[in-house]
Image (cartoon, helix red, strand yellow):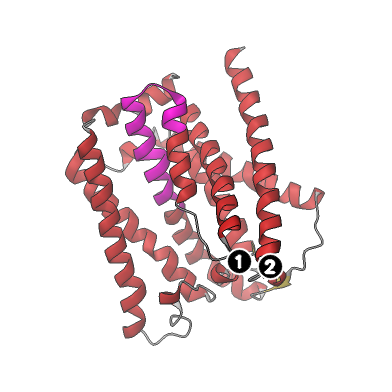
Amino acid sequence: MNQNFATYIQPAFSETRWWKVLLTLVVWAAGYFIFSSILLAVMPMFLDIPGLGDLAQGKFTTPIAVYFLLLTFVVWVGVFWAVVALFHKRGMGSLLGGPKGTFLKCFGWAVVISAVFLITTQTLFPTDDRIVENIAFGRWLALLPLGLCLMLIQVSAEEILFRGYLQQQLAAWVNNRFVYMVIPSILFGLAHFSTELGVTVGWMIVGATGLLGLFLADLTYRTGNLGAAIGVHFANNFGAMFYVSYQEQISGLARFVAPDYFDKPELMAAAASTMLISSAIMFAIYFAIMEWRERR
């Protein structure tokens, strides 16, 4: 275990009883489910805003609907902050890692490198997918600031749980990278399972998302904070939700959409298979290089 990660997990040793960790997760999950369900189901009854009617059906095809979807992660963070403070007597800073300057530096570099990578790969490996405009550029720019703020909360919420709390607590129990990196990544992948486009596509997305989680877990291990993981996650979600959306149900803030993929399980299966294979290859190359550098 490197020194960065050893320092990062120190707060977790203040409470290592398994039942306390399980209680924290159960209370958080119950609180998040209840309050986010209220937000999505009840608010449309009181707000006469076009685009809110489909929230209960899990459709987020308008900007306001995506705003509300992302707003549920404010609930996620609030409830999690409360239960961690209650059961562990810890603040959120202990899950983010520090110092602040290092955290922000890791976040900034991760966003920049990820953005360059995504733009470069899309330029070098163009596809024949039919991409059409979903929101006019001027309106999209006006909608973007609030959307980006809410998405930053969304990715931070997921990282705080999976690469923060779970990875820290597992590392406090077992000094084995396989355990404290792989288990949270599997759970992260399973949290994204959906049968919306079929079971096969759902499991492929779980695999690809799990590999992304493993990459983010390794970044957290090497840097000793969540800055880089949040940065990569942020850039990844921006591309999928705000730039080009291949899924109609979360297309409300996307600049462009790929309509040929909407409700087409066979096309999504092919895309998911490609994403899974490419993710596996890229992670294997990244991990091999990082391990070689560390052991030189």
Q: Is residue 153 above or below residue 251?
A: above
Q: Identify which amino acid the numbered label 1 is placed on.
A: Gln
Residue lying at the far front in this picture: please name it: 199
Circle 2 sits on which residue? 261
Q: Quick one: SS at disc 1?
A: loop
Where residue 144 appears, as percent x and y from the top left, is 55, 66
Quarter of the image where the C terminus is located: top right
Question: Compared to 151, does 133 lie above or below?
Answer: below
For marks 2 and 1, the one nearer the N-term is 1
The magenta segment = 155-181
Asked if residue 162 lies in the magenta stretch, the reply is yes
Q: Which part of the image, by quadrant, shows the N terminus?
A: top left
Residue occupying the point 75% across, 52% down: 122
Residue with the most extreme bottom position = 48
**Position of 116 compared to 34: left or right?**
right
Q: Which residue is mark 1?
A: 247
Apparent side of residue 228 relative to residue 184 in the rendered image (left or right): right
**Percent x, y for residue 203?**
56, 52
Whether 156 is among the magenta residues is yes
**Mark 2 crowd level (few <14, some 14–19, many ≥20, 10 Å Cα):** some
Q: Residue at x 37, y 45 (%)?
A: 161
Residues at marks 2 and 1 touching, judged by CB atoms closer than 8 Å: yes
Identify the image quadrant of residue 52. Answer: bottom left
- Residue 283 position within the rendered picture, expressed as x and y whole percent measured from the top left: 63, 35
- Residue 200 image point, x, y percent: 60, 56
Q: Residue at x 26, y 27 (%)?
A: 13
Q: Is 261 on the left or on the right of 57, as rendered?
A: right
Which amino acid type corresponds to the residue marked 2 in the rendered image? Tyr
Can residue 96 be seen in this snapshot? no
Categorize mark 1 by other alpha carbons within 10 Å: few (<14), some (14-19), many (20+): many
Relative to 262, residue 210 above or below: above
